[in-house]
Amino acid sequence: MNPRAVLFSFLFAAIFVLPSSRSIADPPFSSDNLLGKVRPSIVQIKVIGDKNGSQFTENGTGFVIDTAQGIRVMTAGHVIHPDNFWDDPKNRLIYISWSNFGSTIHPDPVTEAKVEDGRDIAQVYVDPFAINTLKIVNFVYDPSEKLYIPTWPTGKTKAVIKEADATHSNGFQFSLSGTYDYSESGSPVIDRSGQIVGILIERTGDQGGLALVLNSPSAAGDVLATFKANPVTKLVLPTRVQLNFDELAGNCTFLGKRSALVTHKPEDMPFGDDVLRTVNKPDTRETLIGKALSVVTPVNIRSRCPTVIDGSAYYGKVITRMERNDTIRPQQIFALNYLDDVFYWTTVASAQKRQ
């Protein structure tokens, strides 16, 4: 081969191939590139529970960290609220949404969380879909250093990012420039490398936000060290032998959805075609109340019937699974209009395990 041709080929590769490889491996810094790096660790949180006998909801943002005690979702304490805030903290349901590849994942709710007394920090035990976690590093107040807040406010389909300046620090907390929505509470405050220096805990009266300094995982307080529960994504189902079906009264189960009258999918009419046809007609629906309905296709019993908020349905946690030939007696039936379909649910007056 001609030596000049070899030299030209090498120069061509050096000029056109190598810079391209470097640009792919190390893209120039931008807030959008930073968001792409940390977005899998940012979650949206909705908490639904009862306070003073009425349903109460709270919204916030959170982030996934990996501690010596396991994976956590951290958020602001007032998003979760202490146990004494709720009528029954065991019935407080925490919904955590991850955004991945353009779709949003809403797993079954969890109930295990701890709010640290005296500091606006909470942690929730989860076994997340995404293993991406953020790290906490020492925060050194420098008003010339730009900070970033990846956040997932209500109404957004995935996390966004905001640039901010730290305008004041007293060593324990610092003020942020910019404006923030109430549902952005709990967002991490990160540096340009994507590591956590603080957590957004409050909106100020006019503009800006207040962040709590997190110097290290231990700076999140004793809450990280003293919370001993095991990670969960959903309630561990009790065995059917141990489960007392007499205690299922007041819980909720799915009777079917209208579209199953056309599709005939078994999972969409768990009590069979006849029950679905009956419940689909308002003038015959009430005849099912108190009547023993036999399970045809296994169906879950949940802690509460679903609620639609801001276009999304939030289901109660799974209590147990009804198997074929188990029976329930409906107590109160209602129709839920959702996703261009009608879903029929009922609270349970009683349930009986098959003999």
Image (spheres, rainbow, N blue to C red):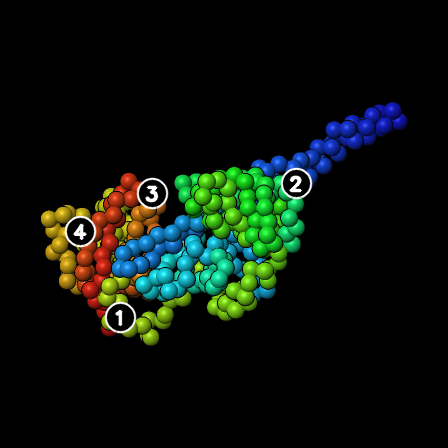
Looking at the image, is mark 1 or mark 2 nearer the viewer? 2
Name the residue beneath numbered marker 4. Answer: 279
* 3D distance between C-alphas at marks 2 and 3: 42 Å
Amino acid of disc 4: Val
* 3D distance between C-alphas at marks 4 and 2: 64 Å
- In this rendering, position of residue 296 left or right of residue 145: left
- Quarter holding the N terminus? top right
User: Residue shown at 35%/46% (left/top)?
Assistant: 312
The tag earlier along the polypeptide, 3 or 4, is 4
Q: Nearer the viewer, residue 88 or 7?
A: 88
Report which quarter residue 328 is drawn in: bottom left
Looking at the image, is mark 2 or mark 3 nearer the viewer? 2
Name the residue beneath numbered marker 1. Answer: 247
The tag earlier along the polypeptide, 1 or 2, is 2
Amino acid of disc 3: Gly
The tag earlier along the polypeptide, 4 or 2, is 2
* 3D distance between C-alphas at marks 3 and 4: 24 Å
Amino acid of disc 2: Ser
Name the residue beneath numbered marker 2. Answer: 144
* Residues marked 4 and 1 touching at CB (< 8 Å): no
Q: Position of residue 101 (x, y in %)?
A: 50, 42
Q: Position of residue 282 (x, y in %)?
A: 14, 48
